[in-house]
Amino acid sequence: MAENNKNAMAGSAPAKPKPAAPVAAKPAAPGTAKPAAPGAAKPAASTGGVYKPPVERAASNPYKDSRVSDLGAWFQERFYVVLPVIDYLKKKEVPKHRLSFWYYFGGLTLFFFIIQILTGLLLLQYYKPTEAEAFTSFVFIQQEVPFGWLLRQMHAWSANAMVMMAFIHMFSTFFMKSYRKPRELMWVSGFVLLVLSLGFGFTGYLLPWNELAFFATQVGTEVPKVAPGGAFLVTLLRGGEEVSGETLTRMFSLHVVLLPGLLMLVLSAHLLLVQVLGTSAPIGYKESGMIKGYEKFFPTFLAKDAIGWLIGFALLVYLAVVSPWEIGVKADALASAPLGIKPEWYFWAQFQLLKDFTFPNGELVAIILFTVGAILWILVPFIDTKSSKEEKSPIFTIIGLLVLAFLLINTYRVYLESAAL
Ligand code: HEM
């Protein structure tokens, strides 16, 4: 309006020149001021203790005069604060060396998580989380819904793939000591992501409401009972004394609301740290010239990531077709438990430990061992001070190998036992 008025005035009678003000009292409006002439009073000087800000200031939004017709410029004008971030990401590089292969597993874990969200959302359109309808809705999805069988199979296979990739990713970052300073929080947030992923597996297992899932959940939710305060936790998980429709409601809400929300929150922090701190190289690689070069994250590394994702996708479809998961029979609380009840494979190592500790209070000792082990594992970046000083820490490599061996051997023992049944 002010601009229009000024123009209107300019078109009419010539304006009378105003007498110059004796002292330039008012500072010019930002953006309109001309640079001060040499010898003019210093703008930021304080007189009598009063601070006066400089007259000339950088425009807060350098894109504010961009053309609206150009879509890119239109967005630039509004989201100009993220432009330095985009510039930063364009420059991001990943080191190339003989262990570079292991960098793809974080991306693969992320890919299978995205598949879980997409297939899960579609399954939700037909799944009914009640004791009476859960099983039949699964049968309906498998047999009646167009491509429902594919969705359900991909969801089940991708869940296993995600946990498997997260384990491989964790051990590869462990052995490369990627957790060392300043990436400690990448490790901590990553471990929380693994626990949440295991939570997805545990809560999702009961959803088909079949016999196997029912009894496995009964065994699984029983575990905390031996620990102090554990009975309360069992009741909280089950929504009562026994596994029932209440348990199904709880598992369902955890599986589709709480866990995805928490996982996305922690995942955002994990990925933000990945972008801000960049990718590490194993200790000593830089100094001994083992880095063969660097490649751009966008688009080179991402394009290679995408090849892994395509292979992962093809594998999921292949497994869904040639090796479908069974639905089994509907859960019946009054029926006797079938032989060889066991949890999902990623809990087998703990499960075997519980079975091995048959001495009095053995289960409690196993739980304590596992809890202490998990706490120490999450604190590794802070305990391994050598690697944070860029020094080799073979002790931690040995610890990692022992943990890996324990998990693999115990998992294999459960596998052997169930194969013999
Ligand atoms: C849902 C699970 C997870 C997702 C989606 C995920 C995703 C990613 C991605 C995309 C990267 C960058 C690429 C790479 O280095 O592989 C990364 C890096 C990293 N992640 Fe994870 N991650 C997960 C779980 C974990 C776990 C369980 C740990 C360890 C306890 C972990 C620790 C790390 C570390 C230390 C790095 C930095 C690697 C480096 O700079 O060399 N992450 N993660």
Image: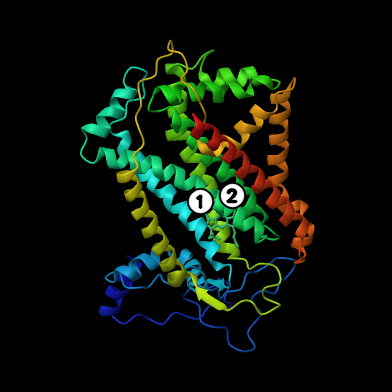
Q: Earlier in the sequence, mark 2 or mark 1?
A: 1
- Callout 2: helix, strand or loop? helix
Q: Residue at x 50, y 61 (%)?
A: 104
The image position of residue 151, as x and y in percent, is 30, 41
| Residue at the limit of the structure toward the front, as seen here | 420
246 versus 9 height, above or below: above
Question: Which of the two residues, 66 or 279, is positioned nearer the viewer here?
Answer: 279
The image position of residue 60, as x and y in percent, is 50, 68
Question: Which of the two residues, 266 or 301, is positioned nearer the viewer here?
Answer: 301
Q: Residue at x 47, y 17 (%)?
A: 337
Question: Is 127 placed left or right of 312 in the picture?
Answer: left
Report the amino acid beneath label 2.
Gly
Mark 1 CB lies closer than 8 A to ligand 1: yes
Which residue does the numbered mark 2 point to in the structure image? 190
| Residue at the limit of the structure toward the top, as seen here | 334
Report the amino acid beneath label 1.
Met
Question: Is 22 placed left or right of 41 in the picture?
Answer: left
In this view of the protein, can residue 88 be seen by the observer?
Answer: yes
Which residue does the numbered mark 1 point to in the structure image? 165
- Callout 1: helix, strand or loop? helix
Mark 2 CB lies closer than 8 A to ligand 1: yes
The image position of residue 188, as x and y in percent, is 64, 49
The quadrant of the image that shows the N terminus is bottom left
Question: Is 320 placed left or right of 166 in the picture?
Answer: left
**Quadrant housing residue 231:** top right
Q: Residue at x 29, y 71 (%)?
A: 70
In this view of the protein, can residue 12 be seen by the observer?
Answer: no
224 versus 335 height, above or below: below
**Quadrant housing residue 410:** top right
Q: Residues within 10 Å of mark 2 (few under 14, many from 20)?
A: many
Question: Which of the two residues, 45 or 339, is positioned nearer the viewer here?
Answer: 339
